[in-house]
Amino acid sequence: MIEGIVAILAGLLLITPIIGRGSAGAKVVGKLTPFEAVIGVVALIVGVLNVMSVTGLVLIVAGLLLAASALAKIPAIGSHLARAGKALKPFRVVIGVVVLVIGVLVLLGIVGGGPPPGLRTG
Protein backbone atom coordinates (compact mmCIF):
# COMPACT_ATOMS: atom_id res chain seq x y z
CA MET A 1 0.00 0.00 0.00
CA ILE A 2 2.85 2.39 0.79
CA GLU A 3 4.17 1.78 -2.73
CA GLY A 4 0.90 3.04 -4.19
CA ILE A 5 0.84 6.20 -2.08
CA VAL A 6 4.47 7.03 -2.87
CA ALA A 7 3.84 6.33 -6.57
CA ILE A 8 0.84 8.68 -6.63
CA LEU A 9 2.76 11.46 -4.90
CA ALA A 10 5.75 11.02 -7.22
CA GLY A 11 3.49 10.84 -10.28
CA LEU A 12 1.71 14.07 -9.33
CA LEU A 13 5.03 15.87 -8.96
CA LEU A 14 6.30 14.53 -12.28
CA ILE A 15 3.23 15.64 -14.26
CA THR A 16 3.41 19.20 -12.93
CA PRO A 17 4.08 20.66 -16.42
CA ILE A 18 0.71 19.46 -17.75
CA ILE A 19 -1.43 20.44 -14.77
CA GLY A 20 -3.31 23.67 -15.54
CA ARG A 21 -2.53 26.73 -13.45
CA GLY A 22 -5.25 27.67 -10.99
CA SER A 23 -6.79 24.21 -11.02
CA ALA A 24 -7.35 22.13 -7.91
CA GLY A 25 -4.58 19.79 -9.06
CA ALA A 26 -2.15 22.69 -9.30
CA LYS A 27 -2.91 23.64 -5.71
CA VAL A 28 -2.22 20.10 -4.48
CA VAL A 29 1.00 19.85 -6.46
CA GLY A 30 2.00 23.32 -5.26
CA LYS A 31 1.84 22.08 -1.67
CA LEU A 32 3.92 19.00 -2.56
CA THR A 33 6.61 20.82 -4.56
CA PRO A 34 8.75 21.85 -1.54
CA PHE A 35 9.04 18.15 -0.67
CA GLU A 36 10.04 17.01 -4.17
CA ALA A 37 13.54 15.83 -3.19
CA VAL A 38 12.25 14.07 -0.05
CA ILE A 39 9.50 12.30 -1.99
CA GLY A 40 12.10 11.38 -4.63
CA VAL A 41 14.44 9.84 -2.06
CA VAL A 42 11.54 7.95 -0.45
CA ALA A 43 10.44 6.72 -3.90
CA LEU A 44 13.97 5.56 -4.62
CA ILE A 45 14.23 3.70 -1.31
CA VAL A 46 10.78 2.08 -1.62
CA GLY A 47 11.63 1.18 -5.22
CA VAL A 48 14.91 -0.49 -4.23
CA LEU A 49 13.12 -2.43 -1.48
CA ASN A 50 10.60 -3.65 -4.09
CA VAL A 51 12.96 -3.97 -7.04
CA MET A 52 11.46 -7.31 -8.09
CA SER A 53 8.13 -5.68 -9.02
CA VAL A 54 7.01 -3.29 -11.74
CA THR A 55 6.01 -0.84 -9.02
CA GLY A 56 9.51 -0.94 -7.58
CA LEU A 57 11.13 -0.32 -10.95
CA VAL A 58 8.98 2.71 -11.78
CA LEU A 59 9.56 4.10 -8.29
CA ILE A 60 13.31 3.88 -8.83
CA VAL A 61 13.01 5.83 -12.08
CA ALA A 62 10.70 8.40 -10.47
CA GLY A 63 13.04 8.71 -7.49
CA LEU A 64 16.01 9.36 -9.75
CA LEU A 65 14.09 12.12 -11.50
CA LEU A 66 12.73 13.81 -8.39
CA ALA A 67 15.82 13.55 -6.21
CA ALA A 68 18.53 14.30 -8.78
CA SER A 69 19.75 17.39 -6.92
CA ALA A 70 19.80 15.62 -3.54
CA LEU A 71 21.53 12.54 -4.97
CA ALA A 72 24.38 14.66 -6.34
CA LYS A 73 25.60 15.21 -2.77
CA ILE A 74 26.27 11.50 -2.09
CA PRO A 75 30.04 10.86 -2.08
CA ALA A 76 31.50 8.66 -4.82
CA ILE A 77 28.25 7.77 -6.66
CA GLY A 78 26.22 10.95 -6.35
CA SER A 79 27.33 12.47 -9.63
CA HIS A 80 26.42 9.29 -11.52
CA LEU A 81 22.96 9.10 -9.91
CA ALA A 82 22.31 12.78 -10.60
CA ARG A 83 23.39 12.34 -14.22
CA ALA A 84 20.97 9.41 -14.60
CA GLY A 85 18.15 11.55 -13.20
CA LYS A 86 18.97 14.43 -15.55
CA ALA A 87 19.12 12.06 -18.54
CA LEU A 88 15.52 11.02 -17.82
CA LYS A 89 14.27 14.62 -17.59
CA PRO A 90 12.92 14.82 -21.19
CA PHE A 91 10.59 11.92 -20.34
CA ARG A 92 9.39 13.42 -17.03
CA VAL A 93 5.70 13.76 -17.93
CA VAL A 94 5.44 10.33 -19.58
CA ILE A 95 7.13 8.68 -16.61
CA GLY A 96 4.88 10.68 -14.29
CA VAL A 97 1.72 9.43 -15.98
CA VAL A 98 2.95 5.82 -15.82
CA VAL A 99 3.92 6.14 -12.14
CA LEU A 100 0.59 7.79 -11.28
CA VAL A 101 -1.44 5.10 -13.05
CA ILE A 102 0.55 2.30 -11.41
CA GLY A 103 0.10 3.96 -8.01
CA VAL A 104 -3.67 4.08 -8.46
CA LEU A 105 -3.71 0.46 -9.65
CA VAL A 106 -1.69 -0.62 -6.60
CA LEU A 107 -4.13 1.13 -4.26
CA LEU A 108 -7.07 -0.51 -6.03
CA GLY A 109 -5.40 -3.91 -5.69
CA ILE A 110 -5.23 -4.48 -9.44
CA VAL A 111 -1.43 -4.39 -9.53
CA GLY A 112 0.41 -5.85 -6.57
CA GLY A 113 3.14 -3.95 -4.81
CA GLY A 114 6.18 -5.71 -3.47
CA PRO A 115 8.00 -8.77 -4.74
CA PRO A 116 6.30 -11.51 -6.77
CA PRO A 117 4.52 -14.19 -4.68
CA GLY A 118 7.28 -16.76 -5.14
CA LEU A 119 9.89 -14.44 -3.63
CA ARG A 120 7.96 -13.20 -0.61
CA THR A 121 9.20 -14.21 2.80
CA GLY A 122 7.03 -14.79 5.81
Image (spheres, rainbow, N blue to C red):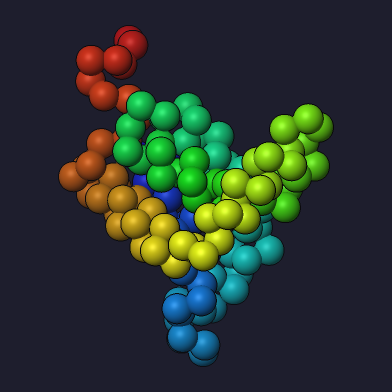
Looking at the picture, does residue 107 appear above or below residue 117? below
For the N terminus, the image quarter is: top left
Looking at the picture, does residue 10 appear above or below residue 82? below
**Looking at the picture, how far across and down is residue 7, in whole percent?**
42, 50
**Looking at the picture, how far across and down is residue 29, in whole percent?**
54, 70
**Looking at the picture, how far across and down is residue 59, in whole percent?**
45, 44
Can residue 39 be spotted in the picture?
no
For the C terminus, the image quarter is: top left
Judge left or right: residue 47 versus residue 42. left
Judge left or right: residue 58 versus residue 13. left
- Viewer-closest of 57 and 103: 57
Residue at figure coordinates x 25%, y 36% from the top left: 112
Looking at the picture, does residue 24 appear above or below residue 55? below
Residue at figure coordinates x 55%, y 34% from the top left: 45
- Viewer-closest of 90 and 55: 90
Looking at the picture, does residue 43 appear above or below residue 37? above
